[in-house]
Amino acid sequence: MRTPPTRRAVLGAAVATAGTAVLAACSGESDTARGGTKAGGPNAGGTSHGGANHGTAPHAKPRGEYVSPDGEEVAAAEVGRGSGPVHKIHLTATPSRLDLGGGLVVGSWAYEARLPGKELRVAVGDTLALTLANHLPATTSLHWHGLNVRNDMDGVPDLTQPPIKQGAEYAYRFKVPHPGTYWFHPHTGVQQDRGLYAPLIVDDPKEPLKYDKEWVVVLDDWVDGVDGSTPDGVLDELSGGRGGMGHGMGHGMGHDGMGDKSDMDDKSDSGDAGHGGSPKSPKSAKRRSGPSRVMKNSFSELLDSHGGNVDYPHYLINGRIPKAPTSFAAKPGDRIRIRIINAGGDTAFRVALGGHRMTITHTDGYPVRHTTTDALLLGMGERYDVVVTAGDGVFPLTALAEGKRASALALLRTGRGAAPTASVRPKELDGKLVEAGELSPDESVALSVREPDRTIRFKLTGNMAAYNWGFNHKPYRPGQRHPVKAGERVRMEFYNVTEMWHPIHLHGHSFGLVGSAGPEHRASHRREATWARKDTAIVRPGSSIAVEFDADNPGLWMLHCHNIYHSDVGMMTVLGYHH
């Protein structure tokens, strides 16, 4: 069982003090690019329908202080990543009518008018050549979440590529570097909280795991097209009309009230919203229509936090509401590999399969030492692979929306039996829950034993009332760079002084999940063989975590909270490789 959380008031004070001390000690470790490189520009866009961009940004710039996304170092790193076949795919993003089941049809945006988008499946070492046609009424992009691709293919507009204009196409082409469970989605505004997402499965030709069937499960929280709501309207309601900071995506800066607040003291992060609070009434909700979507009176004991910002009307598994769930057919005794992806915008899910225990085999695409559990906790962007031996009957796969008093549902059918009700809560949800920090990596992916060459420390700051989420009291600025160098072992420490939990995601790398941050923990955590490999990690309020990674993928890489609304108002920054 997970150890019950300690009192937040005590922890929060300790973390705030530690965070202030360590940040003061290392204030010189991050800087703003003075000759940095930014792909594209305000007028850059994708190619026309008749052209191909070949993945490079226009307007090449002179060699600067940082490695360019399309620089020679990036091309050199790509050379050794495999020589498998090329998979050519054409994908279209369009406004779509989506059937969520039970007679509920909504207008949204999607890939090929499907929800989720059609699964992409390739093998490690293959080349993926995908052209995205943008038929949306807005610019867009495509990010390969968790896949350590070459930097100019990472899909972050105005950082690694120009935005893909309306009516334009963009060609992504990269070698697939490692196997696992991944997914793709836009990195533009809050588009991910529409229907623009799909699983990406990378097979390992030498896969040691034995199983009979495979079930890909995509979790989501849904608001778009319900009673007139849209993610942009939700963002405006939450932020008082100050949303649209963008993900390095061409949105303008300088929104009212979102200036550089370096002198903000820690009291502003204590959150006058409390456990069940909500942001201040917005002065402007320019794009809002329909009912209020602000989450009130929400609290998750598991997260020791407000469950989230958004009161979603529906929670989905593979695009279906609980009253009309999707089913997976198998035979009793089958070993089923379940690949679970949290594609939500603002919701952590606790997942269990009624009548079964699960054996965790992978997290965020990387194998771990097999560990048995009753339930899993997935923050936004996280993935887990589990193996179950199927029983005989009809069983609920339930994804409880933490702190939100609702759930998503799918069914495993191996025999006869009545389907459970939409509100079913299998007992396994309250059983043993193994979290990422309790997992150890498979020996094949364990990091080597090595002292860090560089430590970068971040305070997670902001509160629900002001909706001013950021790192170190500052919203994202396009010129931000936290420098690293190729070949370094980099340690990042995150100190959460807010009242909210945050799933922190690093692009282009996987990291070892070390444990708590701070000087009192460092000596006790020099055991890399025990660190599960991940790219997204939950940081609870009043707590800290440390992660380490090897700087082996040159370029400019986003680091951000994967709560889509937190990141869009500013909780993101950039790691940049120095020449």
Image (cartoon, grey):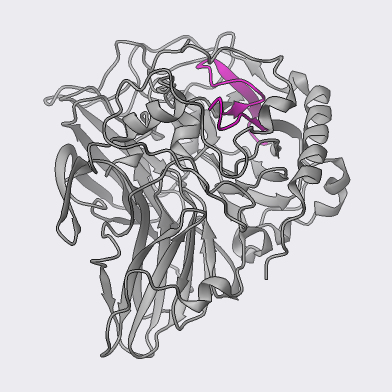
Q: Position of residue 396 (x, y in %)?
A: 37, 75
**Can you see residue 156?**
no
**Can you see residue 124?**
yes
Q: Residue furthest left?
A: 50
Left or right: where 511 falls relative to 86: right
Q: Is residue 474 magenta?
A: yes
Q: Nearer the viewer, residue 171 or 163?
A: 163
Please give the name of the residue rendered at 26% of the width and 67% of the height, measured from the top-left corner.
325
Q: Position of residue 59 (x, y in %)?
A: 35, 11
Is residue 553 shown above or below 62?
below
Rendering quarter of residue 40: top left
Please give the name of the residue rendered at 45% of the width and 69% of the height, measured from the top-left corner.
207
Q: Quadrant of the N terminus?
A: bottom right
Is residue 77 shown above or below 355?
above
Q: Quadrant of the C terminus?
A: top right
Q: Position of residue 498 (x, y in %)?
A: 66, 36
Please give the name of the residue rendered at 41% of the width and 49% of the height, measured from the top-left corner.
82
Q: Nearer the viewer, residue 301 or 204?
A: 301
Q: Looking at the image, how many numbered discs can be counted on the residues?
A: 0
Range of the magenta residues?
Answer: 459-487
Left or right: where 384 falls relative to 164: right
The majority secondary structure of the magenta stretch comes to loop
Left or right: where 268 falls relative to 183: right
Rendering quarter of residue 272: top right
Q: Is residue 3 magenta?
A: no
Q: Position of residue 240 (x, y in %)?
A: 44, 22
Q: Nearer the viewer, residue 92 or 106?
A: 106
Left or right: where 216 falls relative to 27: left
